[in-house]
Amino acid sequence: MTAATERIPVLVTRQEKESITRMARDAGLSVGEYLRRAAAAFRPEEDEQVLLGMIDQVVKTTARASAAVDQALEFVEASNQRMAALEGRLAREA
């Protein structure tokens, strides 16, 4: 591994610095190594593709769930109508 010899000054807020420092410590890394790894892993175009895929799955799942709810409501309505007819028949017979 080549030794790091270049600097990239980055200004952050006090809260951002505390958060980055805490995350680096929790990961068992120096702040510099933590930021190098985070920068190397950052791929916005890949992240966007993953998010678009997730959104597509949410849309499909929501449509299926909505159809299932509609079917359940139709079943309940039909059941209510059968019960009402039965109660009406029982009332007439009584």
Image: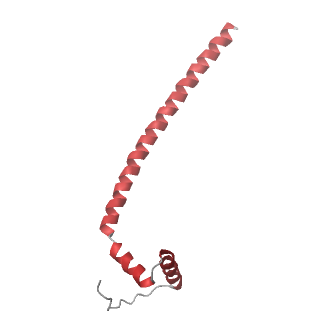
Q: Residue at x 45, y 79 (%)?
A: 29
The answer to which quarter of the image holds residue 2 is bottom left
Furthest residue toward right: 94
Q: Is residue 18 left or right of residue 8?
A: right
**Residue drawn at (35%, 72%) of the image:** 41
User: Where is residue 49 drawn, in percent x and y?
Assistant: 31, 61
Which residue is at 52% across, 24% downward? 78
Compare residues 71 and 25 and report the one nearer the observer.
25
Q: Which quadrant does the C terminus fall into? A: top right
**Does residue 69 sit above or below 57 in this rendering?**
above
- Asked where in the image residue 44 lies, by quadrant, the reply is bottom left
Q: Position of residue 61 (x, y in %)?
A: 41, 46
Q: Camera-side residue: 81 or 31?
A: 31
Q: Quadrant of the N terminus?
A: bottom left
Along the horizontal axis of the image, is 29 left or right of 41?
right
Report the side of 64 relative to 13 (left or right).
left
Q: Which percent across, then down, holds residue 73?
A: 52, 33
Hey, which residue is sitting farthest front in the picture? Answer: 1
